[in-house]
Image (tube, grey):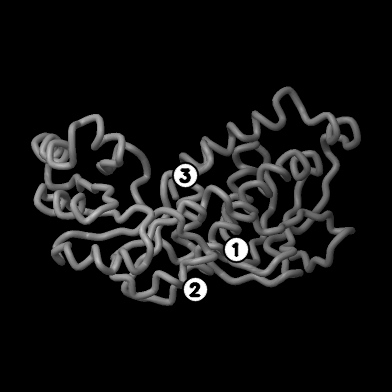
Amino acid sequence: MNKLKAKELIKSFLIEDIFTGDLSAELVFSPEAEGSGVFLSKDDGVICGVDIILTTYEAFGDFVEVNLLKKDGEPIKKGENIAEVKGKIRTLLSCERVILNLLQRMSGIATATKTAVELLNDKTIRICDTRKTTPGLRMFEKYAVRLGGGFNHRMGLYDGVMLKDNHIAFSGGISEAVKLVKSQTGQMVKAEVEAETKEQVLEAVKAGADVIMFDNRTPDEIRELSKLVPKNIITEASGGIGIHNIADFKGCGVDYISMGSLTHSVKPLDISFNSSNGAKANFW
């Protein structure tokens, strides 16, 4: 994850939340008042985004001592502390929600990804994400997918070609669309084609697609369609695949399974920030 970009984004999140000032903290606590607290997990899962804690305080522009007790990608149990912090009370309170929003969401995504990988239980298939991410949070969410054992699909429209049904319809067909792409790109740009039928798969193969995605197909349909694709072409399954049915796709024959649910409808991991008076802490 790009630390400079992360800090820039987090600063904008702080501005959105605090704007002209944190009325609650500023009306109750003096600028010099100091305190300490802990970030505490209230769920079992995979922790992700611990560096966000320090980065947020830095973006806020104030020094806070941070003692990280967990590393990204580590399992965490309900009741375990993630980090201990000391600093000005105003700073701790003003930054609390931005830190928790990111930490909870990223940890939820990492946890869901790990669960999906374990349920699929197929080392021949990689689970990856999609572009169905929260606006402004894509970098954080895709990082969380990697921490959970998954892989990233393209980051945006700029780093890969994906010819979906509307591209194909507007351009007049798979062959024409792939031809136009191949005539204007170099060897570093892959062309992926979405296909639903045997005829579309065969057309994509003949056109020279680099990746063929079987869209909204059952595991049995995917097994049959995969037989039509040469080994040099990467295959992907997508559409309607989630935690509830990922295990059904074990051994279906594709190289990747992309899951939008990893980011667009994930349950955040329950994490709290408590003052040292409200949680057990062993401060350094």
Residue 132, disc: 3
In the drawing, does residue 48 fall left or right of residue 202?
Answer: right
Tell me the residue that label 2 is attached to: 119
At label 1, which amino acid type do we have? Ile
The CA span between labels 2 and 1 is: 19 Å
Query: Disc 3 on helix, strand or loop?
Result: loop
The CA span between labels 3 and 2 is: 22 Å
Q: Position of residue 56 (x, y in %)?
A: 62, 43
Query: Disc 2 on helix, strand or loop?
Result: helix
In the drawing, does residue 29 fall left or right of residue 206?
Answer: right
Residue 79, disc: none
**Given the current orientation, which residue lies at the most extreme top position?**
20
Neighbor class of circle 3 (other Cα within 10 Å; few <14, some 14-19, many 20+) is some
At label 2, which amino acid type do we have? Leu
- Number of labels in the image equals 3
Which quarter of the picture shows residue 277? bottom right
The CA span between labels 3 and 1 is: 22 Å
In the drawing, does residue 269 fall left or right of residue 186?
Answer: right
Q: Sequence-wise, which precedes: disc 3 or disc 1?
A: 1
